[in-house]
Image (cartoon, rainbow, N blue to C red):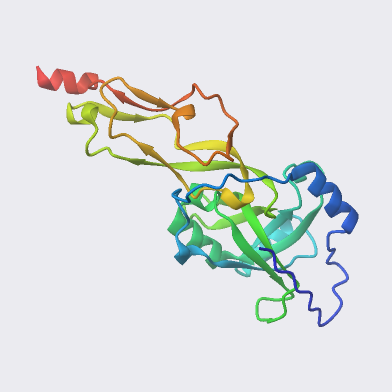
Amino acid sequence: MLIRRIVLTKPLHHFRLFSATATATATATATAIVTLPDLEQDYPKPDPKYDETIHAVVRVASGKNIAAKERKAGRVPSIVFEQEDGQHGGNKRLISVQANQIRKLVNHLGRSHFLSRLFDLEVRPNFESDDVIEKVRVLPRKVHLEAGSDAPLNVTFIRAPPSALLKVEVPLVFIGDDVSPGLKKGSYLNIIKRTVKFLCPADVIPPYIEVDLSELDVNQKLLMGDLRVHPALKLIQPKDHPVVKIAGARVSDQKKAK
């Protein structure tokens, strides 16, 4: 649920709220009302311990020099897009988030799990202020990390109201490898895909998809269309593309066995 509270203690001349017209246009373009089936909710749910609110402050300008100053001050230059294709001209907001918080979330969750999880984003005049300019639900779209240190360099978010349909690279979690007939025979696991792209209603974005290997024998595989997901999710990759295969013994292993 979105909670929005405007508390401005002083004018922010450079802070541009989304206009009603722009919001209506974006909503018509990128969202649709989705009626979800009444099912038992036995699908994976996010771990509550990572239900953090991401804190942000207004950023009034962009550019390499501004971004460098933000990073030096422990902040990560970021953008919130109003709609799915916002990077191609849609309405956007410039913000900065806390480097330590983003680093912790990415490290704890893993990059792919961070990018498939919804967060509350609170925008404040500054990080010490108790005044909330806006609180909105967002999905991290991209996070760039510095090579070597994994320090976050920038983050892109997209607004995720309940009715939004969002493209999400959902991470895969492999289970049942300890009882897989093929693996017990000495074959090896060939993981072909670690994420699969779905069009998801914001309210049912799965934190991950389980891939059950417990019945796979030698040379058997699972396809994208075999994945068990909420029926409201729409696969936007070919159903016949393989996700994982139990492959025969490696050539090196065959030579060792002789």
Write the residue at 59% across / 68% down: 53
Residue 60 x, y percent position in the rendering: 80, 65
Q: Residue furthest front?
A: 38
Residue closest to the eye, 106 or 145: 106
Residue 27 x, y percent position in the rendering: 79, 49
Q: Quadrant of the C terminus?
A: top left
Query: Which quarter of the figure has residue 34?
Result: top right
Q: In the shown orientation, is residue 128 left or right of residue 50?
A: right
Residue closest to the eye, 12 or 68: 12
Residue 226 x, y percent position in the rendering: 44, 29
Q: Quadrant of the N terminus?
A: bottom right
Tell me if residue 258 comes above or below residue 140 in the rendering: above
Query: Which quarter of the figure has residue 132?
Result: bottom right
Write the residue at 75% across / 65% down: 59
Write the residue at 66% across / 52% down: 156
Write the residue at 45% across / 56% down: 109
Residue 213 x, y percent position in the rendering: 31, 34
Q: In the shown orientation, is residue 118 left or right of residue 18?
A: left
Q: In the shown orientation, is residue 44 left or right of residue 102?
A: left
Residue closest to the eye, 64 or 180: 180
What is the number of callouts on the image?
A: 0
